Amino acid sequence: MIPPVAKLRKLIDESDTDLEKIFDSHAGIAHTRWATHGPPSTTNCHPHRSDPNWEFSIVHNGIITNYKELKTLLQTKGFKFETETDTECIAKLTKYIHDQHPSIGFTDLAKAVIQELEGAYGLLIKSVHYPHEVIAARKGSPLVIGVKTERRMKVDFVDVEYSDENAALPAEAAAQNVAIKKNDLLAPDSGLLGAPDKSLLHRSQSRAFMTDDGMPMPTEFFLSSDPSAIVEHTKKVMYLEDDDIAHIHEGSLNIHRLKKADGSSNVRTIQTLELELQEIMKGKFDHFMQKEIFEQPESVVNTMRGRLDIANKTVTLGGLRSYISTIRRCRRIIFIACGTSYHSCMAVRGIFEELAEIPIAVELASDFLDRQAPVFRDDTCVFVSQSGETADSLMALRYCLERGALTVGIVNVVGSSISLLTHCGVHVNAGPEIGVASTKAYTSQFIAMVMFALSLSEDRASKKARREEIMEGLSNVSSQIKHILELDSSIKKLCENFKNQKSLLLLGRGSQFSTALEGALKIKEISYLHCEAVMSGELKHGVLALVDENLPIIMILTRDDLFKKSLNAYQQVIARGGKPIVICNPDDEEFKSSEAEKIEIPKTVDVLQGLLNVIPLQLIAYWLAVLEGLNVDFPRNLAKSVTVE
């Protein structure tokens, strides 16, 4: 991780870097590091170098699990390490192999390096030995390539080239660079680059980037782990798959693989992003998180658009159509997710059990893997992720695929790893979410999964009335969220009472416990205030000891079948001198004479109430952070898409 931009600019200004120096290069690499091995520091920042002369430079996202063995080996070969990171091993390993085979081609060198790596990586390699070229490779970590050309491309795909995985290193082979040989950079008596010898051109130029006369057309390439970083430059993108090695050189791009995977495509399609630059700008809002909270009336409609037909009382999820009958016959449905996505799965567990009448399990991806939980061929495993790149969820997905289960992806990013690897799925269509703390993705995931449950129960006549009741509730959700957002100023004022507090309790029962979990996570994430979600029924089993007149408590007490039981917990808190803030329905008789602070939320169908109740908790988390002067969009130690274990 790097400091905020202002601090980073200050560090650059204080450094002795010559910012006026001009480099004869068409390629550059950089990276915002997520600290796994070694703390965030200048020394551990990317790119990492192979040696003091920077023969090879590496940026890398992921974790190399065998880095200790590689480091020990390289140290015995005389390499001195400057950082505490696992990435430095890749740079030094690259140099070591190149030193043994100095005439090796850049792609063959990358293949040799990658065969020695264990773990996950999205990496870029740049070298003085291969000027104007970049190698990109991925395994278990997302990598997308943006393509910008002056002319229309001949085809909208790039062919994949395969090689023998066990082939020996071609030590005797001449370099196969598209660019000019490394010792002949300049034409005689000229300060300009000489024209490349056509005999040196790559033998398998990609058809997409060739002109009519067979020469490479001028092309810019942008590489990122997230397409939102590319959209300001181009909307044409290509998603690399695991074990792909991309070689970018002199206006062309080639995709290589060591071997062909079963069922894998022979091409990588160049797609057009359905994303506008203004969608990733803050507009009139102070923070992305605030903007995304206030976008929810529109984002929930986008999730339902073209899928929910209120007039005919039907739900159509095109991505599931071919598999819905198989899912209805499955032995059980296992929801697997992390963080906010896990909470959205918890929120809809009850409605799946009620409508589908299939056993439901909800699993944290990391714990699911740790336990090596049993999975069977007649199970359906549903993977929920905003980014579609969450490392733990991806590993759990591969685990389930190996055991023959049917897999479903529910993601917000088209072309993400989970969307590509699962058998079928639903795009939640919430739009880009920039703030680290997820808000609109949660509500859209919630709705997408409710529609999934409605689809599963279409063949059950006994569920018809209940399904129609839920659909009617969905039709009103957008306007109800708008109404809740009008409470923004009063919630800000309420948050001023939390000044200097160190802890907070959030109580909910039944489906509202998942709402409490999500609200507590939001508060912890961005305000750094310790917040614990407690199931109301567990209050008397220990947590009640914490309650006094000073402890801030928020209780979710909207009307449902468990309201009377939840009210018992409220009475117990009051009896111990507690002063809870109550989230309730408007004009509830139980709280009319109460002195408790109230946040009144419109009433809806019981299974959708959590969708509305979470909105004020999002606003509370936001204002707690703002009032403390914290970085709302990018809280310390966290990242938007967690692509490492």
Image: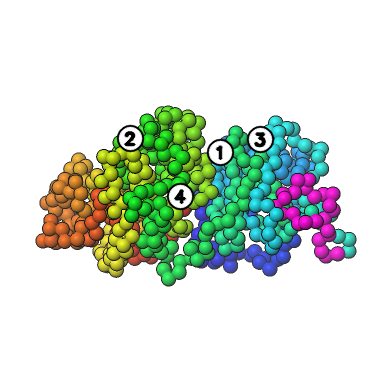
Q: Residues within 10 Å of mark 1 (few under 14, many from 20)?
A: some
Q: Which residue is mark 3?
A: 259
Q: Which residue is mark 2?
A: 358
Q: Residues within 10 Å of mark 4 (few under 14, many from 20)?
A: many
Furthest-right residue in this view: 188
Which mark is first along the chain, 3 or 2? 3
User: Is 325 drawn above or below residue 219 in the view shown?
Assistant: above
Amino acid type, mark 3: Lys
Give percent across and percent down for residue 421: 52, 40
Q: CA distance from mark 3 to mark 4?
A: 31 Å
Which mark is first along the chain, 3 or 1? 1
Magenta-colored stretch includes residue 555: no
Question: Which range of residues does the magenta coloring cover?
Answer: 190-213
Instruction: Report whether residue 512 is seen.
Output: no
* Figure quadrant of residue 25: bottom right
Q: Disc 1 vs disc 4: which is toward the camera?
A: 4
Amino acid type, mark 2: Ile
